[in-house]
Image (tube, rainbow, N blue to C red):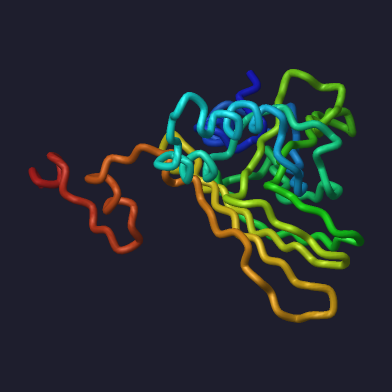
Amino acid sequence: IDVRGPTPFGSRSLEVLIDARDRLLRPGGRIIGRTDRVIVAPTRTPAVFRREIHAAHGREGVNLDPVERIVFDTPLRCTIAPEDLISDGQCWQVVDYRSVTSTDATGSLAWRHERGRTFDGFAVWFEADLADGIGFSTRPGGAVSAYKQMFIPLQRPVALGDGDQLRLELTARQVRENYVWSWRAWLTAEGSETRTLVADQNSLAEVVLDPAAVPLTGGSAIPSKGPRASAL
């Protein structure tokens, strides 16, 4: 059963696959698919985001300012056109299902742009290796239509000058039934060594958490006694 979404990081999909492999796969058995390469590229705003988010602002007198920050901090599963990409995709993560043990992922990428462009976020998709070089890609404009891509929006568009370098630090962390994404981006102008932070966002606001459970996840948290511990 394929439990992936636009990326391997969705809900408890990766956790389920790791558990199934460890419990059910016999020695010498094979997993299909074998690996996923997660690809990221800077992009302009996809049509669906323009239609459903941008166009709704101010319509019929509705003020969306109170929820705007949550909307622009929430990755969106949607179709991204290949002409929206302003740079080639780069591999952010390789998920090897034969050996992966963590459901979290983090990594950095960098692009240097030869000519000035403006971008509004990042497109994310994956390339699957099923076995022995047989696979498929969910890239924008590709032949595979069963999957969509994921759009990670910025709070505001970012203009790139000629020769500017764009650097992205992207992290996905599982929080119970959900993933919290965080993304930070910097620009370094041509001929400069100074990095300017242009985005520092995360999707925590879209995850509904029980405040009583938050302290239990801290590194310094001390678990409370359960009934058996109390009896002992």
- Quarter of the rendering containing residue 158: bottom right
Q: Is residue 33 left or right of residue 133?
A: left
Residue closest to the eye, 66 or 77: 66
Q: Kindly identify the residue that appears in the image at 87 percent across and 22 percent down.
A: 143
Asked if residue 29 can be seen in this view, the reply is no
Q: Kindly identify the residue that appears in the image at 55 percent across and 59 percent down.
A: 200
Q: Vertically, is 218 above or below 194?
A: above
Residue 81: percent from left, percent from top: 80, 31
Asked if residue 198 can be seen in this view, the reply is yes
Q: Is residue 9 left or right of residue 138?
A: left
Q: Kindly identify the residue that appears in the image at 52 percent across and 36 percent down.
A: 15
| The N terminus lies in quadrant | top right
Residue 218: percent from left, percent from top: 33, 57
Residue closest to the eye, 3 or 40: 40
Residue closest to the eye, 51 or 128: 51
- Quarter of the rendering containing residue 66: top left
Q: Vertically, is 208 above or below 102?
A: above
User: Can you name the residue that lies furthest to the front here?
Assistant: 61
